[in-house]
Image (tube, rainbow, N blue to C red):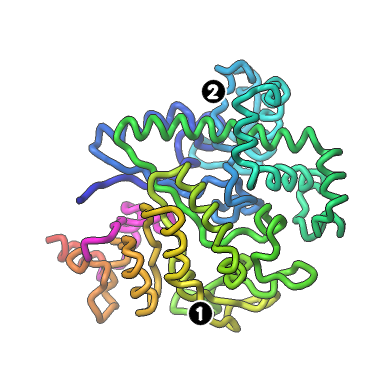
Amino acid sequence: MRASGVLLPIASLPSKYGIGSFSENAYKFIDQLKAGGQQYWQILPIGPTGFGDSPYQSFSTFAGNPYFIDLDQLIEDGLLTKRECEECDFGNDSRVINYEKVYLNRFPILRKAYKRSNCTSNPEFNMFVKENDFWLEDYALYMAIKDSYKGLSWIEWDKDIRLRKKEAIVEYRTKLSDDVEFYKFIQYVFLKHWNKLKKYANKNGIKIIGDIPIYVAFDSADTWANPELFQFDDKLEPIAVSGCPPDGFAKDGQLWGNPLYRWEVHKETGYEWWINRIEYSFIWYDVLRVDHFKGFDEYYSIPYGHETARSGQWKKGPGIDFFKTVQRRLGKLNIIAEDLGFITDSVKKLLKKTNFPGMKVIQFAFDSRDENESDYLPHNYEKNCIVYTGTHDNDTTKGWVEKVSEDDLEYILAYLN
């Protein structure tokens, strides 16, 4: 079966509030997809972003990004006024996102909505809190404490709360109770607005493809609440971090810096944290793109503190045991494996065992310097794959064509006849 769709991050939707959101423009985009005969809308991760504003470095793998809450819906609900929203300075250039201004203005306006919501007496809110207890309590407390420390990473907090001593948890939960409830409230609103949008998409024949990063950020509720699942030392500092080895594009390799998993501990728990994560992702999405699929076969481990990725080593990942365990618990899932870059025979075997479709990127196909015929040329595609003109890491097709060498452009035109 063939089907087509469009990759468009939520943040890139038009908006009068500084950044794309679950607003009227999101519904209009779904209408456009339907009118164009499309069946899929792929988005980037929608978790709360940290100081680098990257969706792949989130404060939580379970929480949603407050930037995407629809302020107009809060106006309709009587929690905000139109004037309050219009008076916020989210930046004056609709073509770019001013993340600093979005950050400085989004949270104060959401706090106004929270103060007026009386959410703790709302049965729907209380049910949401109860159903999401397995991640929400830790996340809301983490964010409230982080605010009290003026944004410092949890590794810089006082020792007792950094180590999650019981007395410290009780103390902070009590003295920051209002802030904790605020962070629960915005997650409740986020999911309410997202579920409404997804329901509209599905009703119009559009399925949502989500994106799950393989790694979590070091400064996250996930690592603070579950340090035993990560390669940390006795001081809770990383022993090794993620990245990629040197290649033709990066002579020092890539130092991503995410903490690595203790896969042996995950296996002992039946991959419980991962299963919760994947199961929760399918509440949000119809299809899930798993980022850096190669990392489940083998992962690149760089000693913490090194300035480049040169001294890293490949280490064995959980392999097929992980995916078999997930399937036993959750059944057959619609997963896309991000298998781009240098892929070994071992990764290819793992992909074949899972029967997940891999990815093909047309922009990678036309390199006139490559003596071997590219696997990304369309006539070399196997049936079980997802084809992209480009991903979020690529230029637009127009920009790509304008920048390729004359030899590559000649190659493209000759291939397309």
Quadrant of res 340: bottom left
How far is disc 1 from disc 2 in space, using C-alphas?
A: 48 Å
Q: Amino acid at mark 1?
A: Pro
Among the two numbered marks 1 and 2 on one chain, the one whose residue lies closer to the N terminus: 2
Label 1 packing within 10 angstroms: few (<14), some (14-19), many (20+):
some
The answer to whether residue 309 shows anywhere in this view is: yes
Q: Position of residue 323 (x, y in %)?
A: 43, 64
Magenta span covers which residues? 382-407
Is residue 206 shown left or right of residue 12? left
CB atoms of marks 1 and 2 within 8 Å = no
Q: Nearer the viewer, residue 151 or 413?
A: 151
Tag of residue 73: 2
Q: Decide whether residue 400 is among the magenta residues.
A: yes
Is residue 273 shown left or right of residue 401? right
The answer to whether residue 393 shows anywhere in this view is: no
Q: Amino acid at mark 2?
A: Gln
Residue lying at 33% horizontally and 45% vertically, measured from the top left? 6
Residue lying at 51% horizontally and 30% vertically, measured from the top left? 193
Q: Above or below — where is 222 with respect to 124?
A: below
- Residue at the spot of label 1: 246
Quadrant of res 227: bottom right
Q: Position of residue 203 (x, y in %)?
A: 33, 30
